[in-house]
Image (spheres, grey):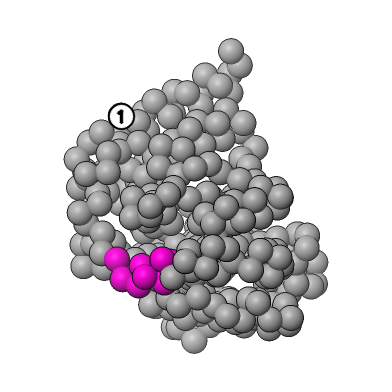
Amino acid sequence: MTIQKIKTNFFIGIAKLIAKLPLVVIIFLGKIIGYLTWAIPNKRKKIARRNIELCFPDLEQNQQKSLLKANLISTGIGFSEMLIAYWSKDKKFIGDFEFSGLQHVHTALTKGKGCILMSCHLHTIELASRAINIKLEKPSFILGRQHNNKVFEALIDKARRAHCEKTIDKKDLRSVLKALKNNRCIFYIPDQNFSYQCEYIDFFKQPAATVIAPVRIAQSSSASVVPWFCFREKGKWVIQFLPALEYFHQNDISNSLLKMNQLFELQIKKHPEQYLWVHRRFKNHPKGKNYLYKDL
């Protein structure tokens, strides 16, 4: 057994124990983690600050600072929500979810071409995905990036398989198309930085390397693309599904990606503190890699 495996198993064991605690305690621990991330200097805090400066230039400095603090605390809560999603029982959280627009998913599946459940990297994404799977007749697939720590990846995949079919690597398009051909749902969260098969599309008025695969998959499979978003509101998790995005089946890829990013912007602005600003969304840049972050 390697040192990496021992360390990973140890931390996962602690995470599983935390997931057994009452919901309010788990969320409170997440808030503490988030507050420490705000209080202690670290690289992720610097990245989040830079992203907020870039994307919300109209905010005054004290407003940007307040948003940064709220975002890092929300990031900590998002971490605790991941633990709940992976290792807690359904009854612990499902009663605190509200759904609207689920009929758009059912309508998509009646066409027999599968359904791409598209969202952006909100902090609630893992827990919300599990809640949605509880509502679906058949468990969905999750499209994602393989983690560099293979031990960790295997343990997370095992946790996800308790409520979804499996995780598909983002490069495995054959498996994606097969799942859609079988009229299944696939969670696709395509708003992170990409270094290949992408176009620079505006996101909060910044050139963002945006992957073109969502459009190509939708066109190749004829699957419906149903956007959904989940925010914490008034002590509950609120999930809203929107009507299928018809523009994904048009020929203009750049225009489709621009409309997708504009949709993400519109939703993120509702609760900007609940978005993953600690990610280097603009890492790849027309002026060079890390152009906007090289001084951090």
Where is residue 127? Give x, y as percent. Answer: 37, 51
Q: Residue 275: give x, y in percent of width and height.
A: 45, 65
Viewer-nearest residue: 263 or 251: 251
Relative side of 11 to 2, left or right? left
200 drawn magenta: no
The answer to whether residue 207 is left or right of residue 61 is right
Three-letter amino acid code of the residue under disc 1? Leu
Image point 52% across, 49% down: which residue?
141
User: Residue sitting at 38 percent across and 54 percent down?
Assistant: 136
Task: Identify the element where label 1 is drawn.
Answer: helix
Q: Quadrant of the N terminus?
A: top right
Q: Is residue 142 above or below residue 285?
A: above
Residue plotted at (24% across, 49% down): 93
> Magenta segment, which residues?
99-106
Answer whether residue 105 is magenta in the image. Answer: yes
Q: Which class describes the residues within 10 Å of circle 1: few (<14), some (14-19), or many (20+)?
A: few
Q: Please state if 53 lies on the left or on the right of 200 as rendered.
A: left
Percent x, y of residue 148: 65, 37
Identify the image quadrant of residue 192: bottom right
Task: Give the camera-side residue of 158 and 235.
Answer: 158
